[in-house]
Amino acid sequence: MSYHLDFSNQAKNDIDFHKKSGNKIVLKKIFVFVKRTYRTSF
């Protein structure tokens, strides 16, 4: 079984914004959340 997360355009824009800002702490929190969501989804 595999899962797929579909990000909205707003979410993609927000991630791009944080990438450009260089805020590594926020980016790490975002990607940890995504990783955990993949592992522990329904």
Image: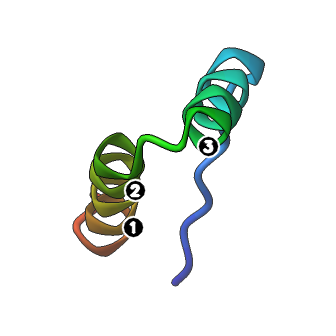
Task: Report how far apart the C-alphas of labels 1 and 2 lie in the structure.
Answer: 6 Å
Q: Nearer the viewer, mark 3 or mark 2?
A: 3
In front: 20, or 41?
20
Dot 2 falls on a residue whose secondary structure is: helix
> Residue at 36% of width from left, 68% of height from top?
35
Q: Is residue 40 above or below residue 31?
A: below
| Neighbour tally class for label 3: few under 14, some 14-19, many 20 plus, Cα within 10 Å | few
Dot 1 falls on a residue whose secondary structure is: helix
Q: Which residue is mark 1?
A: 38
| Neighbour tally class for label 1: few under 14, some 14-19, many 20 plus, Cα within 10 Å | some
In front: 1, or 14?
14
In the image, residue 37 lies at what x, y percent? 32, 58
Q: Which residue is mark 3?
A: 19
Q: Amino acid at mark 3?
A: Lys
Q: Is residue 5 above or below residue 41?
A: above
Q: Amino acid at mark 1?
A: Tyr
